[in-house]
Image: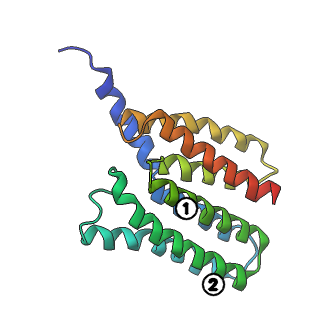
Amino acid sequence: MGYNSGMDLKKPARIVSEIFNGFVMMILTPTIAMIIPDIPLIYKIIGPISYFAVTIIPFFILKKMGRISDYEFTKREERPPYFTIVTIGYLVLYIAFSLIIRDTTISLVLLALFSTSCILTMVTLFWKMSGHMTYSTLFFFTLLFLFPQVSYLLLIFLLTPLIATSRVILKKHTIMQTIIGTLVCATISILIYWVI
């Protein structure tokens, strides 16, 4: 038997890919933003549940309708319906929670999530950009924004090349698609969290 390094890398690549799954990152970002501040407990519960529902329910509906073949949206043409629905849901939740909770930090995180989803949706109409990279980058920048006093959090960005490499090894994205996903979200995050 010959040595096949490609097969050896697929298993750890799959593990990394599952840990930093787009759904997980999409839900963790608003959840951590709503759990940390001093807001009423009901919003700490309703907020994450709302984002979970808006992220997951459209997937199952589109899957049942036969519009999606797998949870990684391998086919580019399957992405626009899902991301359009989710982006509209994120807009509604951003407006609702910004008006109800009135916490600037939470509003900025929810705006960053909506903006990221909006750009990903538009790009997806013409090209395939890595959702794993987009949403993990958003999550990493959100952690830096929420915990600016924890300087070693910058080290979390060492995971970025690992996540990108996993997506390329699994043949889900090209190197360029992972780089663009990272750069687009880094730009959105920096603009919303530290420039606006």
Which mark is drawn over residue 117? 1
Identify the residue at the far top of this view: 2
Which mark is drawn over residue 42? 2
> Is 132 placed left or right of 143 in the picture?
left
Examine the rendered structure and indicate whether residue 14 appears above or below residue 139.
Answer: above
**Residue 118 occupies quadrant:** bottom right
What x and y, as percent, mark residue 70? 29, 56
What x and y, as percent, mark residue 65? 25, 72
Residue 163 seen from this side: no
Q: CA distance from mark 1 to mark 2?
A: 26 Å
How many C-alpha atoms fall within 10 Å of the one at disc 2: few (<14), some, or many (≥20)? few
Q: Residue at x 21, y 14 (%)?
A: 2
> Is 51 placed left or right of 67 in the picture?
right
Kind of residue at badge 1: Ser
What x and y, as percent, mark residue 151? 78, 43
Query: For the residue labelled by badge 2, is the local secondary structure a helix, a strand or a loop?
Result: helix
Q: Earlier in the sequence, mark 1 or mark 2?
A: 2
How many C-alpha atoms fall within 10 Å of the one at disc 1: few (<14), some, or many (≥20)? many
